Image (spheres, grey):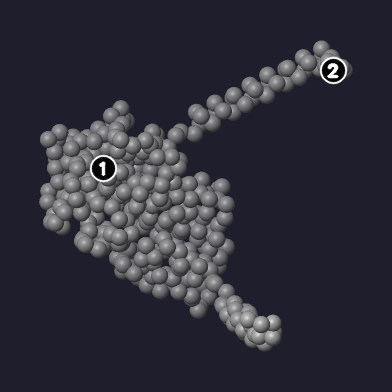
Amino acid sequence: MSNKQVIKVIPLILVVLIALSYAVYASASNTPAVSDVERLSAEPGMKRMNFELKEASHAPKLNKQDAIKRAKDIIGDAFDNDNATSVNAVYTLFTDKVAPDLLQPEKNILIKDLPVWIVTFDGIKIPGHGVPVMPSEKPEQNHINTQLNVVVDANTGEEIMMFSYK
Amino acid sequence: MVKITLLPNVKRVFKEKLVRLATINMVILAIILVGAPAFANYFNGGTRGYSGCTGAAATIETADPIVVTNGSSSSWAAVVGSNSGQYVQVGWAKDYPNSPRFFTESRKSLGDPYDLKWWGSTSAGAHNDYMVGRDSTTWYFKINGNVKTTVAVSALGWTGQYAYALGETWYSGDHCPGTVSNPVTIGNAQYKNSSYVWNTAYLYPYNDNPTNFANNVNSNGDSLFEIWDKR
């Protein structure tokens, strides 16, 4: 390729580069911020447990601070939660896709788009129940999860369930 | 060469402080070792190997045993794979500080976290049917015939080798479900074979804390037995 030909191609390359840069910029600036509900909903453990979360449109009767306090009351001083590295709460509509009407039959609570606070304690110690170690195995070290989720009814403060997946 | 020597008085004071510091450290270490019991699961009940096992079930009585701070006492049915990191289980647990409640738990392999769910409540003396079994695609966790949760077979990825129906504790101070005068009954033990057919499970006795725990599981295999704490 001669020098003249190269000079002719340069503007074309510049135009293409500018167009690509604009496309990347436009794409990035149009990406909506990920909400807490979306972030929590996307966790693999939530999917494994067949939970579905949606954004809630109505304000809860229980505020975030009260929900966290309620969750702390529920677990008391268990799981070394005084040393939790963080405690957060997400307000969401909560569905158990497998057993929405059977988890709490005695309370007649339908766990389908139920407004709840999911209060998450990180950095705590939750041993699994597990099963006996096989004769050929050494006892496993650090057989613990470090995150606990306490699901609190956002209107009544009632405990719905607790779960842990990591 | 310049030789630096400490005054005898400074040496003595330094030595005394060193000894004092070492003594304090040893006392603190002793307090930690004595005051913090080591976590160690103990189990009591029945187990048996069933190659290709696809389910385990039992009717288990709820108890309200003594548990220490952060301790647990529970009883459940489980299918276990080729190592102790592969299991699915369903039953009741009194996990400190709560009263007995239902739980399900599953795990893919050693080193992985486990999926653990607690909810509801069950009173001492109640007899509930716990069943965990699979078809070609899904593990189903049932209590009293109702599916409470599921997990995809592909998410766990192992093949069942054992059926367990056990009581369990977390710390030596936790009491096994059942007492001498009021043992916990585990009955109607079943396993599901590799063709997805339920059969009576004749479990063999298992007790890794004979000092404190006891059971009356027949050594030839049993589907109805009792477990208790001797303390």
Please provide percent x and percent y for residue A71. Answer: 49, 57
SS type, badge 1: strand
Name the quadrant of the C terminus of chain B.
Answer: top left
The picture quadrant where one finds residue A10 is bottom right
Name the quadrant of the N terminus of chain B.
Answer: top right
Q: Residues within 10 Å of mark 1 (few under 14, many from 20)?
A: many
Front-most of B84 and B19? B84
Front-most of B129 and B51? B51
Subunit that carries the residue with mark 1 = B
Direction from residue B108 to residue B11 in the image, left or right: right
Question: At 17% across and 50% down in the image, what residue appears?
Answer: B191
The furthest residue to the front: A2
The picture quadrant where one finds residue B221 is top left
Please provide percent x and percent y for residue A61. Answer: 52, 71
Please provide percent x and percent y for residue B64. Answer: 32, 44
Q: Residues under labels 2 and 1: Cα distance?
A: 69 Å
Q: Is residue A42 above or below residue B183?
A: below
Any mark on residue B166, and which? 1
Front-most of A76 and A1? A1
Question: At 27% across and 48% down in the image, what residue appears?
Answer: B81
Q: Visible in this render: residue B125?
A: no
Question: At 55% across and 48% down in the image, what residue appears?
Answer: A82
Q: Which residue is mark 2?
A: B4
Q: Is residue A131 above or below residue A119?
A: above
Tag 1: amino acid: Leu
Direction from residue B174 to residue B125 in the image, left or right: left
SS type, badge 2: loop
